Amino acid sequence: MRSVGILLFDDAELLDFAGPYEVFSVANELHNDALFDIFTISMTGEAIRSVHGMIIVPDFSIKNCPPADILVIPGGDGTKQVIRDEGLLSWIHNSYKKADITFSVCSGARIPAVLGLLDDKEFTTHHAVVGDVVAIAPKAIPGKGKRFVDNGKVMTAAGISAGIDLSLHVVGKLHGAFVKEQTMRYMEYPH
């Protein structure tokens, strides 16, 4: 079983984290809860308010969360604050080192960019954020028009709904095409 830690912070884009949460949860449910242990994390463990106002209570703080094999970093306006928070960035970087996969969704790409994780690598993000990421990480290579980019340990997804595509890709990569297709079919997600 692999652990999936989903980072939450104020002004995170709701579907950026809810989409991956749903994909991993559905795949898990279809396989007797044997594939993934999914949990959410915020800096303090206190509730966060998403971009459009929904309040979410995380499972853990960065101080008491278990290690994540897969770390999901959503986007949203809150990423502008995250990239200025040295304590949170340090935790993310340490978590990245321990994780098998770290992936960002949408403008969440600012975070691996500021940590140098996209240097000399292809990436994707929301079309309106490509310039921001390149300004942060001039060595990063924009993957124009791609829904997601898999660089192995670090992956990026384009805007908002593309986080679902990347999560399904990760499910397929780890557990095969059948599990991915089964998850898509259950979610009524088009091919």
Image: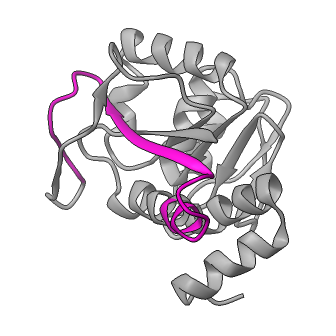
Figure quadrant of residue 101: top right
Image coordinates for residue 34, horizontal then vertical, percent: 60, 52
* Residue 44 placement (x, y as % from top left): 22, 21
Q: Is residue 36 visible?
A: yes
Question: In the image, is residue 129 above or below residue 127?
Answer: above
Locate residue 165 relative to residue 105 in the image: left or right: right
Q: Residue furthest front?
A: 32
Task: Name which quarter of the figure residue 139 lies in.
Answer: top right
Please provide percent x and percent y for residue 81: 32, 29
Q: What range of the chain is rendered magenta?
A: 25-50
Residue 68 is situated, as x and y percent measured from the top left of the image, at: 55, 30
Q: Is residue 107 above or below residue 144?
A: above
What residue is drawn where x is 63% and y is 59%?
167
Q: Is residue 117 left or right of residue 42?
A: right
At horizontal 72% and vertical 87% (from top left) the residue drawn is: 191
Q: Is residue 189 visible?
A: no
Q: Residue at x 77, y 34 (%)?
A: 153
